Image (spheres, rainbow, N blue to C red):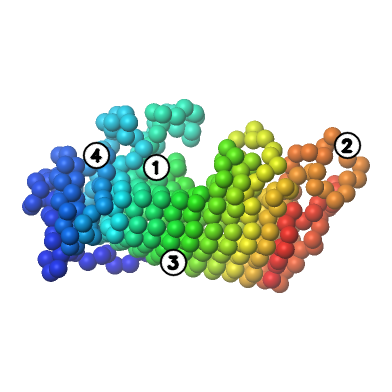
Amino acid sequence: MPGAPAPAPSDDGDNVYDVIKDFGAVGDGVTDDTDAIKTAWDTACQDDGEGVVLAAAGHSFLVHTTTFTGPCQGSVTLQIDGTIVAPSEPTTWPANSKRNWLVFYKADGMALRGSGLIDGKGQKWWDLPCKPHKGGSTHGPCDSPVALRFFMSNNVTVQGLRVQDSPEFHFRFDSCRGVHVDSLSISSPALSPNTDGIHVENTQDVLITNTVVSNGDDCVSIGAGTLNVHIENVTCGPGHGISIGSLGKQGSRACVANITVRNAVIRHSDNGVRIKTWQGGSGSVSAVTFENVRMDAVRNPIIIDQYYCLTKSCENATTAVFVSDITYAGIRGTYDVRGPPIHFGCSDAVPCTNITLSGRNFHYSTFAMAVQGHKKNYIQKKGLDPSLSSGIIRTMIKLGGTFSAGSSIVPRISVNNVFIDYLLMTNFVFR
């Protein structure tokens, strides 16, 4: 669980800008307090010392979409000890401002902390009839706001808060450097669509610690252009686990490197730790370590999928995002019978390279590893129609009992008298 909340600001050494006492906020959860909070921020931003914007405990502040802009003269802390609530009706949002709720732009050195709650009021957004899970497919009106977006902001700290029910991502860090997220509680219903807990893209030097996320999508998602991320003591679930990607969509180039996930717990989730890339993309995912991760009733604990596709009609491509130097150490727990504990779908054109698993231990009646690859990469074809030499095949390797450290698997498997180069990988190691 998250640690103790951040301490309340003191008059000693800080200039406190109280949004009620100094700027006329009402704090009843009904009156629009956007201007009061924005003016308090702008005033603190001109302070060349350490300014604290205080939304005090015992009050609820209705805030419409707004941008807190820097650079500031000194450092600014937005201290949320009360509750910040979004408008609950999608129709009340400006037509051109449905992508973000609270944005921090060029806010270098800022801190967002406190013991309070940020409530995105997402239910009516999730229920829009054009949402994919409602059978719709249109865009535009279904754009939903990210609760908190940090854009081009460096040396940022977010600590101690509860954030719930964002219409879309709860946090998005984009084009930032030096981010520390600590002791947060992030929650939304298990069926809330696209409600990633923390999303990071085009950002480097990120530390995420001591945080609990339960939601309807990825616990933490890492997008293109992300470097040097350390995630530790994070608890996820329900949700979709910790994901790198998706990357390479529509032929784009994506690079991700130096990612560590350590001492994490993932519960009752569709996925555990996942790398997902689209066919046709380029770039690389490299130097990734998943260490000491405990799974509890996770459907797909370990996944590398270079064939990621949201429909059944994605065409095969000869390029892919290169996946290399991936280490899994001390991954353990229980998995759902509906899926194998390990699934590697690696490209024949750009195979996964230098994949190491050690100390893994999954419990169920059988162990199964999913194997996926192009038929044209078969080592031998015995009695097959030559017309079947393209396309994708999926099959399973099964071992009885518990799959644990010391188990071994032969480097080739046979399916219908056809030998498949094992996982289309190079330098694949079990320990």
Q: Relative to residue 224, is residue 288 depicted above or below?
A: below
Residue to which mark 3 is pinned? 233
- Residue at horizontal 59%, vertical 59%? 286
For the residue marked with disc 1, what is the amino acid? Glu
Q: Give the spatial CA distance, label 1 vs label 3.
A: 24 Å
Q: Give the spatial CA distance, label 4 vs label 1.
A: 16 Å
Disc 4 is placed on an element classified as: loop
For the residue marked with disc 2, what is the amino acid? Asp
Q: Give the spatial CA distance, label 2 vs label 3.
A: 52 Å
Q: Earlier in the sequence, mark 2 or mark 4?
A: 4
Residue to which mark 2 is pinned? 385
Residue count near mark 1 (Cα–Cα under 10 Å), binned few <14, some 14–19, many ≥20: many
Q: How many marks?
A: 4
Q: Give the spatial CA distance, label 2 vs label 4.
A: 62 Å
- Residue at horizontal 19%, vertical 42%? 34
For the residue marked with disc 4, what is the amino acid? His
Residue to which mark 1 is pinned? 168
Q: Nearer the viewer, residue 63 or 272?
A: 63
Residue count near mark 3 (Cα–Cα under 10 Å), binned few <14, some 14–19, many ≥20: many
Q: Nearer the viewer, residue 118 or 227?
A: 227
x and y, in percent, of residue 402 in the image: 68, 66
x and y, in percent, of residue 248 in the image: 58, 44
